[in-house]
Amino acid sequence: MNVTAKLRALLAQKGMVVAPGAYDCIMARAIERAGFAAVYMTGGGTAATLGYPDYGLLTMSEMADNAGRIAASVALPIIADADTGYGNELNMVRTVREYERRGVAGMHIEDQGFPKKCGHLEGKEIVPIEDYVAKIRAAVSAKKDPNFLIIARTDSRGVIGFEEAITRVNAAIEAGADMAFVEAPQTLEEVAAVPRLVKGPCLLNVVWRGKTPEVSMTDAEAMGYKVTILPGLLGRAMLGAAEAALVEFKRIDKHPEPSLSLTPQEGFRRAGADEWDGYRTAFRAPISRAAE
């Protein structure tokens, strides 16, 4: 079963898929080892790894390439941030093709102008609904694999209002999108209302100290969400651990004990050393020598 079929099978089951965010293969493998069913490639995290804020400064190929590296590192399906599709309908067609070609299982497309901003920041610009829906239609038409998931995201809640956000994602579902993503509902009542009002499956974005109130996974599932992503869960944890280790190193003037105490060999095993060690001898057939 390929990754797109895996994701569709997960969504067909009862319950909700939880996909923590990864911006590299180390994180993706940690998510897989922890027993989660899917990985979310965070656009904000991907931008940060290249030294930029989440302001739409990365190109489509930079985002698609990172999604491809992550997809190649794990057996789990990858849901990836695809920003606005990086242009008009022509760019959207190419974006879908490039993400599909790199082994991604699904992607979300938003209705901000480009360059965009993180959905939990102020000062976003929203494109007209007809432009947004046209790009959704283009994305749906560009799929070569019918199981590839097109997720329609709207950032209009903070700019135009909650009612308009629901109108937009319903228009996107009608245009062929597989799932709706209302970014940054601002009250628990709004969070709960999204799955009731949207005419299709819904994704919830959980951002620590963002615009959306804190929601447990149990409550999100009970509300009717099919997917919840946690883009910054691991990135913030790793940044916090890194900064704490550097402070401790300066304090004690020697290598501090890490929170995860691995030998070098164990660390390399986390990066796939067992597979690669097998190749050292797998192709060395015994050499037969004729009798002298």
Image (cartoon, rainbow, N blue to C red):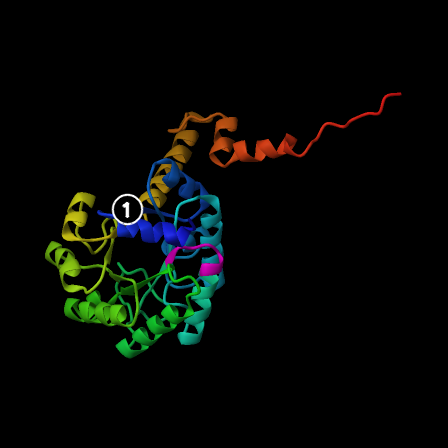
Magenta region: 100-106
Look at the image and say whether residue 201 sits in the magenta stretch. no
The vertical placement of 164 against 50, above or below, is below
Q: Quick check: can you spot residue 227?
A: yes
Residue 117 placed where, x, y %? Answer: 33, 63
Q: Nearer the viewer, residue 254 or 125?
A: 125
Q: Residue furthest front?
A: 291
Residue 72 placed where, x, y %? Answer: 48, 48
Q: Is residue 206 left or right of residue 263?
A: left
Q: Is residue 276 left or right of residue 216?
A: right
Residue 78 placed where, x, y %? Answer: 39, 51
Look at the image and say whether residue 103 sits in the magenta stretch. yes
Looking at the image, how many numbered discs can be counted on the residues?
1
Q: Quick check: can you spot residue 214?
A: no
Name the residue beneath numbered marker 1.
18
Residue 205 placed where, x, y %? Answer: 26, 54
Which residue is at a point 21% across and 69% down the rendered structure image? 170
* Few, some or many residues within 10 Å of mark 1 (<14, 14–19, 20+): many
Which residue is at a point 33% across and 53% down the rendered structure image? 8
The vertical placement of 78 against 137, above or below, is above
Q: Could you say which quadrant of the image residue 282 lies in? A: top right
- What kind of residue is marked 1? Val
Q: Nearer the viewer, residue 253 or 226?
A: 226
Q: Residue furthest top?
A: 292
Which residue is at a point 51% across and 32% down the rendered structure image? 268
